[in-house]
Amino acid sequence: MANDSVRERLLQVVWKEIRSADETNVLNVPAARRATEAGASPGDLARAMTAASYETAFRLLFLLSAEHAEEANVDARKGWTIVETALGDSGEPTAITSSELEFLHEDLLTCDPTGADGQDLFT
């Protein structure tokens, strides 16, 4: 796999977003607040929202893989690449690294920062 560190850093950012819902901030979503007022557990709502975020991230990474481009109704001969840049003091890119997105969706679960490989989302 070309430039694994770029892929790993991207997946860390994705997981940070996936795991951003918790019992306190789910109440910022009006539908979740209404569900809580109707008796739903904030913890269950956070888990459901996190699972939905995971499913969205997985599906997006799946569709961005060149081998699945036809499902997104795009030219399967073209693909996507991660481009990571380091910025210098002036804000100009000083280093550019890249990695193909091929099979990135398959690495998503194993990069779960909790070590649970996402299993806690579906129990």
Image (tube, helix red, strand yellow):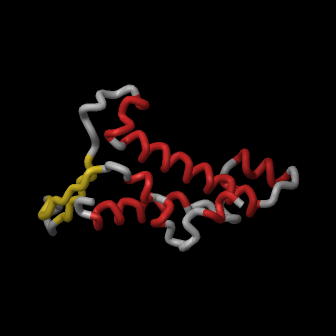
Residue displayed at 21% across by 60% down: 85
**Depth order, front residue of 110/81:** 110
- Identify the residue at image location x=67%, y=50%: 29
Image coords of residue 73 (percent x, y): 39, 26
Q: Is residue 11 left or right of residue 56?
A: left
Residue 56 shown left or right of residue 63 in the figure: right
How many marks the image carries: the answer is 0
Depth check: give the residue in front, 49 or 105. 105
Give the quadrant of the N terminus: bottom left
80 to 22, vertically: above or below:
above
User: What residue appears at the point 41 percent right and 61 percent down from the top-left corner?
Assistant: 11
When asked about the image quadrant of residue 63, the answer is top left
Front residue (pair 74, 23):
74
Occupied quadrant, residue 2:
bottom left
Q: Position of residue 101 (x, y in %)?
A: 32, 50
Kindly give the residue lying farthest to the bottom in the view shown.
115
Does residue 31 appear left or right of residue 115 in this picture? right
In this rendering, position of residue 72 left or right of residue 102: right
Is residue 20 visible to the viewer in this orientation of the structure? yes
**Vertical side of 2 occupied by 101: above or below:** above
Work out which quarter of the rendered image holds the C terminus and state it: bottom right
> With respect to residue 80, does 28 lie above or below?
below
Farthest right residue in view: 39
Residue drawn at (32%, 60%), measured in percent from left and top? 7
Residue 16 visible somewhere in the drawing: no
Write down the quadrant of residue 10 in the picture: bottom left
Residue nearest the observer in this picture, 103 or 95: 103
Residue 91 at what x, y percent from top left? 17, 61
